[in-house]
Image (cartoon, rainbow, N blue to C red):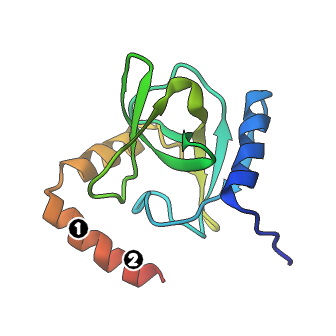
């Protein structure tokens, strides 16, 4: 099967317009920023425009001109959304609520059952992950990145 690889700004800009029309879109993820919950290059996500946005949601957002991230919503305050990747040990992004293109409804691994990231089980896993000490998450991610390559 042939693959067509487009720059993120082009592809995700089109995804944003499809989501604004009320459609659902499935995209293959890239990168390590959402480890251990989403594996870039392997897992796909089903996106939909959904309001209201809630802390804990995984959102596709335009954080600056033509720069998109698929990260978890940490906080929403006065129309400003703070995002951070589960695999990012430090650093956050901020954008306006209007710049959130869509929210992940399902994480779809290549084999196996799709997972709802807002299910009670997945939310417990995420909260436990963030309660781990920084050093534990750092070592786990370093080992995990080497194993999944």
The N terminus, quarter of image:
bottom right
| Disc 1 packing (10 Å; few <14; some 14–19; many ≥20) | some
Residue 69, x across and y down, in percent = 53, 49
Q: Nearer the viewer, residue 77 or 135?
A: 77
Instruction: Tell me: residue 133, above or below residue 95.
Output: below
Say which label, 2 or 1, has the lower sequence index. Answer: 1
Distance between the Cα atoms at labels 2 and 1? 11 Å
Residue drawn at x 45%, y 66% is 32
Residue 33 sits in which quadrant?
bottom left
Residue 66, x across and y down, in percent = 63, 47
Contact, CB < 8 Å: mark 2 with mark 1? Answer: no
- 124 relative position to 37: left or right: left
Q: Secondary structure at mark 1?
A: helix
Mark number, residue 138:
1
Q: Which residue is mark 2?
A: 145
Residue 125, x across and y down, in percent = 33, 49
Instruction: Tell me: residue 144, above or below residue 48.
Output: below
| Disc 2 packing (10 Å; few <14; some 14–19; many ≥20) | some
């Amino acid at each position: 099967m042939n693959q067509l690889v487009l720059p993120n700004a082009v592809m995700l800009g089109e995804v944003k317009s499809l989501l604004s029309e009320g459609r659902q879109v499935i995209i293959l993820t890239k990168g390590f920023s959402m480890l251990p919950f989403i594996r870039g290059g392997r897992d796909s996500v089903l996106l939909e425009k959904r309001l209201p946005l809630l802390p804990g949601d995984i959102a596709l957002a335009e954080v600056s001109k033509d720069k998109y991230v698929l990260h978890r919503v940490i906080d929403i305050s006065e129309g400003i959304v703070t995002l951070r990747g589960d695999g990012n040990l430090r650093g956050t992004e901020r954008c306006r609520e209007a710049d959130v293109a869509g929210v992940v409804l399902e994480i779809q691994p290549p084999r196996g059952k799709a997972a709802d990231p807002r299910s009670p089980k997945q939310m417990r896993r995420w909260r436990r992950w963030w309660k781990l000490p920084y050093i534990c998450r750092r070592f786990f991610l370093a080992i995990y990145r080497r194993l999944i390559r």
